[in-house]
Structure formats: C-alpha cells, structure tokens
Image (cartoon, grey):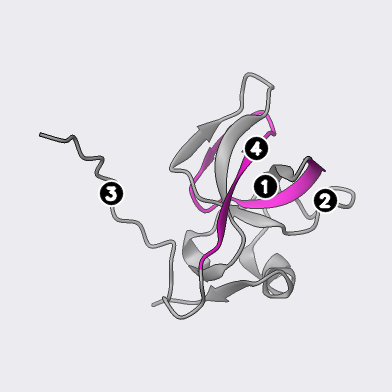
Amino acid sequence: MASETIYPYDDLFAGGVQQVVSVPGFITGGGVYQRGQVLALVSTKNGVHTTKPVDSAAAAPGNRVFAVLADIEVDTSAGQPVPCALYFSGEYNAKALKFQNTDKVDTFAAQMRDVGITVKYVL
C-alpha cells in the first residue's frame, strides 16, 4: 500500500484561469516562513533563484516582488539558504498572502501584477 501525503486545505489560490508556474529555488532571511509569503529576488546563479521575504523598507531588489512561497513552512533561522518551491504566476487570495513587518498586499499589488501574480479579494 502506497503512503499518501495529505495537505490541509488553504485559501491561497483564488482562481484557476491563470496558469500557475512553479520552480525550485532557495529562501533565506533568518526566520520561519509560511506558504503564501511574498518574496523578493536576492540572486540568481546557474538559473537557480535565491529569495527572501519582500520588504517595502529594503533597498532594491529586496523591495520588489519576485515570487510567492509554495511550501507549507520553511525554516531559515539557521542563517543558510533553504531549498523551497516558488510560484511565479497564478491567482492568489489577498487575505492569504503574507508580508514582512507592517507591509500589506496593497503596497505590492501593482508589482505583483507586473510579474504575473494576480491578487484577488475573496469574501
């Protein structure tokens, strides 16, 4: 009998019209991050992207949206980049997206649209 991984339902996706593109990458930042964390690009080497949570107070490119974290939870508190899955596109529930500090979805909504991430307000 094959084992099966069951993930709890979440409300991250807010539509199925726009294609969801996911790629492997890395996340850094020194914290524990949840699925839906909005990320900025740190670097790209040999086609592999390293990201960190986007922050409006950071200098570029740390203040520019790049992707959304796909993994349930990623712990970067050891200070090293950790492998993760990144969503590059799709339709996302504004209430399920996660940001640093006091940042809100409205701060980054236009940037998200520019990179192929659509934000929807789901009741």
Q: Which residue is mark 2?
A: 57
Q: Is residue 35 magenta?
A: yes
Mark 3 or 2, nearer chain start:
3
Q: Position of residue 101 (x, y in %)?
A: 67, 47
Instruction: State the separation of the CA atoms marked 3 and 1.
Output: 26 Å
* Highlighted range, magenta: 20-45
Given the image, on which type of amino acid does mark 2 rest? Answer: Ala
Residue to which mark 1 is pinned: 101
Under circle 1, the secondary element is loop
Q: Amino acid at mark 1?
A: Asn
In the rendered structure, are the residues bearing label 1 and label 2 in contact, judged by CB atoms less than 8 Å apart? yes
Furthest toward the bottom, the residue is 17
Viewer-nearest of discs 3 and 1: 3
Can you tell which of label 3 and label 2 is closer to the viewer?
A: 3
Quick one: label 4, few (<14), some, or many (20+) residues within 10 Å?
many
**CA separation in Å, label 3 and label 2:** 33 Å
Q: Residues within 10 Å of mark 3 (few under 14, many from 20)?
A: few
Q: Quadrant of the N terminus?
A: top left
Give the amino acid type for the residue marked by disc 4 in the picture: Ile
Work out whether residue 98 or residue 72 is closer to the camera in this orientation and state it. Answer: 72
Which residue lies under the disc numbered 4?
27
Q: Which residue is mark 3?
A: 8
Residue found at x 28% / y 49%? 8
Q: Is residue 51 left or right of residue 62?
A: left
Counting residues from the start of the chain, the first of labels 1 and 4 encountered is 4
Q: Main secondary structure of the magenta part?
A: strand
